[in-house]
Image (cartoon, rainbow, N blue to C red):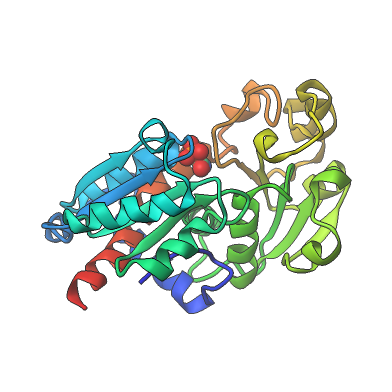
Amino acid sequence: MHLIGLREMDRRQMIGLLDRAEDYLKEDGTVTTPAGRRRELEDTTVGLLFLEASTGTRVSFELAARRLGADTVIVTPQEGERWREESATDACRTLAAMGVDGFIVRHHDRQLPHMLVDRLQVPIINAGNGSGEHPTQGLLDALTLRRHFGLEKDLSGLKVAIMGDVVHSRVARSDAHAFSKLGAEVLLAGPRMLLPSGDRGQRWPGEMSTSRKEAITWADAVVMLPIAQERIHGTIIDPHDYAMDWGVDSSIMERYLDREAVILHPGPVVRGVELSDPVVDNERCLILKQVTNGVAMRQAVLQTYFASASLS
Ligand code: CP
């Protein structure tokens, strides 16, 4: 009924969602809603509770919901800023009493989606909880890799480096769980202070590296991460220094990245920091494919979690 993280999801469920997302993609890779599916969520209202900034994820979920015939109500960070964690639960209860059938939730607090699951009887989909997880991003990244490399079922045989500010990244955590459960080898790469360590490190799937060259040379795919400066307390990362040490520009790409290898980024990209302009615009950078696949994946998620909840 709920999608909070990929740590709890098994391989079979993940493959089921990837396969279902394929139903919403045409052969040429564009998003479609087959005629018989345009009313799958008719009479359903999806609450988009985005209490932390988002453009990509919110719009992607909104489009996905509408393409399945659902209504949407949106709560923005400005509207939600007077709610503390407790009252966010009350606000959801109020909206549920008005007929909202479930919630897509983004919030800086890792606990909020868990709290909502405990207190409400409607589907809760986590769209990013602080440095916790971002499960639909993990699934859409897995879908993008599976389609790009023409893989049938899972990601067996692929080597994927997740590089940058790993420890503060919910995308990194969801990607690492998705890729490793789907059979890929995972390498977490970044400056030592931005990699998980100690007990925290042991909960992450994958090996670790503090060498950009090693990670890029090794990988079939590199997922570049933005710096989550809002979650780094006490240290300001200088963007120029970071770009020099950990960014990818054309020269790094040509020297180290295999000719068949690709680059992903969850967006929004800070051009000139994680990736240079020519790299963002290179055809081996799959950002726009990720965005397109994201709508299909969110259609699959809404169909799975909301349609089945309305039947139960
Ligand atoms: N990928 C992602 O979470 O982007 P937004 O922050 O724009 O939603």
Answer yes or no: is residue 25 visible. no
Q: Position of residue 126 (x, y in %)?
A: 45, 56
Is residue 280 or residue 55 the one in the foreground? 55
Question: Would residue 113 be seen by someone viewing this image from the given angle?
Answer: yes
In this rendering, is residue 53 above or below 156?
Answer: above
Task: Please tell me which residue is depicted at 75% across the width and 64% down the height of the picture.
Answer: 206
Of residues 32 and 127, which is closer to you in this image?
Answer: 127
Q: Is residue 296 found left or right of 160 in the rendered image?
A: left
In the figure, residue 270 lies in which quadrant?
A: top right
- Quarter placement of the C terminus: bottom left
Q: Nearer the viewer, residue 4 or 97?
A: 97
Q: In the rendering, at what x and y percent does residue 181 appear?
A: 61, 72
Q: Nearer the viewer, residue 11 or 87?
A: 87
- The residue lying at 42 percent from left, 48 percent from top is 294
Q: Is residue 280 above or below residue 166?
A: above
| Residue at the image point whose x is 66% and y is 66% from the top | 184
Figure quadrant of residue 283:
top right
From the viewer's perspective, is 161 left or right of 4?
right
- In the rendered view, tell whether residue 295 sits above or below residue 251: below
The N terminus appears in which quarter of the rendering?
bottom left
Query: Where does residue 175 sit, x and y in percent of width and height?
Result: 60, 57
